[in-house]
Image (tube, helix red, strand yellow):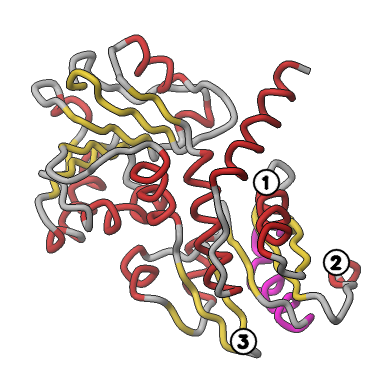
Amino acid sequence: MSDLFDFDAQVDRYAVMGNPIAHSQSPRIHARFAAQTGQRLDYSAIQVDLGGFSQAVGNFVASRGKGLNITVPFKQEAFMRVTQRTPRAERAGAVNTIKIDKKNLLGDTTDGVGLVTDLIHNHGLSLRQRRILLMGAGGAARGVIEPLMQQKPDYLVIANRTPDKAVALAQLFSDLGTIHGSGYEQLADQQFDLVINATAASLQGEMPELPDECLVEGACCYDMMYGKVTQFMHWAGVHGAGLVVDGLGMLVEQAAESFYLWRGVRPHTAPVIQALRDLNTASRLG
């Protein structure tokens, strides 16, 4: 792997690690952040073999790298690999951002703040006293529960194909407010202001088993997947959602939080989100 670590010693190095990683937009995002803020850095994407994550991180630290983003499927391994964690990473049980200071590795999670920032600042939503449905009980869901509950919704329901997992996750975060866990069949008599898809269904071209009448009029439906219209987004449009959103804004906002942790400078996200949307549109048309 030594050829991955040839670099200009004067330029701070950052990277995203995952498997697969070729599709990652993170290098493009951070290059735009750096240009916008006048920061001199290099950001690359590194595909890591399954079973090779700890060694890859060690190699990057040895090369005097300054920070890492971590994506699927290594966020739980990153949680175990770091030497220190922020409170929100400790609560989420996952790490997607590592700040490297010599041999000290500070782990953070920026996914939740990225989602909430996108919803509130980019789409003008208020989550206060809202009824929220979060679909999925895996790492993607776990990482956003605390930031969502900090907005003081009326309540949060976690739904999952395996109800026991949703119930266990709800109990784990129950000190933050009113949180329930259930299967999808228990949603038949409930309606929500905001529905968030944190499942892997969209990656597989599938749709969670939502009841047809679970949206209030004008509800927002948010899919963490980005880059295409998913089955969930199509369902939302058919069933009367007032706002249907993909996860591109969340991606950029969580990257901005990582950038701020590393560099102490907060970039403007709106032009980066728009630039990526324009690129996605152009690639589809092309």
Circle number at residue 150: none
- The secondary element bearing badge 1 is classed as loop
Q: Nearer the viewer, mark 1 or mark 2?
A: 1
Q: Residue at x 66, y 51 (%)?
A: 29
| Residue displayed at 75% across by 72% down | 13
Q: Which residue is mark 3?
A: 101
Q: Which residues are magenta?
A: 48-63
Q: Which mark is residue 4?
A: 2
Q: Within 10 Å of the Cα at label 2, are there few (<14), some (14-19), or many (20+) other Cα atoms?
A: few
Could you tell me if residue 204 is visible in this image? yes
The secondary structure making up most of the magenta span is helix
Q: Position of residue 65 (x, y in %)?
A: 73, 77
The answer to which of marks 3 and 2 sits earlier in the sequence is 2
145 on left or right of 28: left
Q: Is residue 233 left or right of residue 120?
A: right
Give the Cα separation between the discs numbered 1 and 3.
25 Å
Above or below 209: residue 164: below
SS label for mark 2: helix
Please tell me how crowded label 1 is: few (under 14), some (14-19), or many (20+) other residues with Cα within 10 Å: some
Residue 73 seen in the figure: no
Which residue appears at 54% of the width and 34% of the height?
A: 226
Q: Which residue occupies the foreground of this view, 26 or 187?
A: 26
Q: Position of residue 78 (x, y in %)?
A: 53, 69
> Of the residues shown, which amino acid type is indicated by label 1?
Ser
Please tell me which residue is depicted at 70% across the width and 31% down the height of the picture.
279
Q: Amino acid at mark 2?
A: Leu
How far apart are labels 1 and 2 at the CA level?
A: 17 Å
Pointer 1 residue? 24
Residue 202 located left or right of residue 144: right
Measuring from the top left, give residue 48's x and y in whole percent. Answer: 71, 59
